DNA sequence: GTCCAGTTGCGACTGAGTCTCAGTATCTTG
DNA sequence: CAAGATACTGAGACTCAGTCGCAACTGGAC
């Protein structure tokens, strides 16, 4: 989770203009616990009568992804979604029940990647690890039924 | 890489009917080194005048994914692609230059996943690791220029 | 206040993937 | 081997995410 001020600050710092639509989007993105699709934001914007166009949302999301405020993830269903996150390298853990996304630090994955590089002869440049499962709350909720 | 006979055998074993379009698709999928999109197959089918419909290809690909003969991967560009592979659990290493895909065994990733589960409180059910880089050949080709 | 590049919203467009439906082919059973 | 049940197929219409082009607008530097 991230707050709107940080998003706006990052945009400003990244050389982007601070426009009304971007401020609006910052507040929509900020505070989201889970992953969201571009369409989720579009709906939310419509519901709040912010008057944001589809293209604007996609463009702003691109900018945020560029800045590392937001990251694209691919759900197991094949959908494209985003999560708001801090810029440092990390991995996403997504709850398949409630959609909440958490991020986790590296835990030796670099070493695994390096080893796979050695095994296959590839020079590994980037990697993506996405984990799916149940978050503690959903786990508890499920256990208590 | 996988051969057509295996693909056909798996379909038969999985309770699918062995139809001409599926045989044709098996031979298209078999022998591919790299990843391919549904559209690649559609093109290839058209070029060989196999007369396969778009829907048929998607359906057959779903069936193959179900059987684990083929696996969906998400390219960094956001495209959806497939790779033919063996069914055992493994990870994909994709060459960002020539598109070739190789698979690598686990190398302790299970442990990393378990540790991340512990850190975040999630019960991790599945994970996806995708690695991108340059394969040995592209690396050599690049070095010799 | 003025100006201009960066930005916006609109609507048309594209391309991947799905759905429907009538016709066809496969496998099973006798 | 014939016949029937039904899984499968191709065509094309459709949907939906994401992009593009463009005229109008606006933030912020001066």
Image (cartoon, coloured by chain):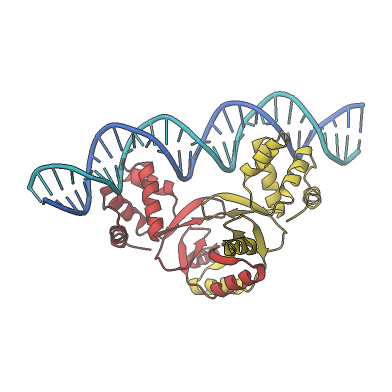
Chain colours: A yellow, B red, C blue, D cyan
- Would residue A130 be visible to someone looking at this image? no
Q: Residue at x 75, y 55 (%)?
A: A2
D30 versus B90 height, above or below: above
Residue A136, given in percent of the width and then of the height, sits at 64, 64
Question: Where the C terminus of chain B falls, by quadrant?
Answer: bottom right
Q: Nearer the viewer, residue A131 or B46?
A: A131
Q: Is residue B82 left or right of residue B2?
A: right
Q: Nearer the viewer, residue B48 or A5?
A: A5
A73 versus C2 height, above or below: below
Q: Is residue B98 left or right of residue D27?
A: left
Q: Residue at x 33, y 43 (%)?
A: B52
**Residue B47, image quadrant:** top left
D4 versus B15 height, above or below: above
Q: Is residue A82 left or right of residue C7?
A: left
Q: Residue at x 67, y 47 (%)?
A: A62
- Would residue B24 be visible to someone looking at this image? yes
Q: Nearer the viewer, residue A5 or A102?
A: A102
Question: Where the N terminus of chain B falls, by quadrant?
Answer: bottom left
Residue A48, given in percent of the width and then of the height, sits at 72, 37
How many discs appear? 0
């Amino acid at each position: 989770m991230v707050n709107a001020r940080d998003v706006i600050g990052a945009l400003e710092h990244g050389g982007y203009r601070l426009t009304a639509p971007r401020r609006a989007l910052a507040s929509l993105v900020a505070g989201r616990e889970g992953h969201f699709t571009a369409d989720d934001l579009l709906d939310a914007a419509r519901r709040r009568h912010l008057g944001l166009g589809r293209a604007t949302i996609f463009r702003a999301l691109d900018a945020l992804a560029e800045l590392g405020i937001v990251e694209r993830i691919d759900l197991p269903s094949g959908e494209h979604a985003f999560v708001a996150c801090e810029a440092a390298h990390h991995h996403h853990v997504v709850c398949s029940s409630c959609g909440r996304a958490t991020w986790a630090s590296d835990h030796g994955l670099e070493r695994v990647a390096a080893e796979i590089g050695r095994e296959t002869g590839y020079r590994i440049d980037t990697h993506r690890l996405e984990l799916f499962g149940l978050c503690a709350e959903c786990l508890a909720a499920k256990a208590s039924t």
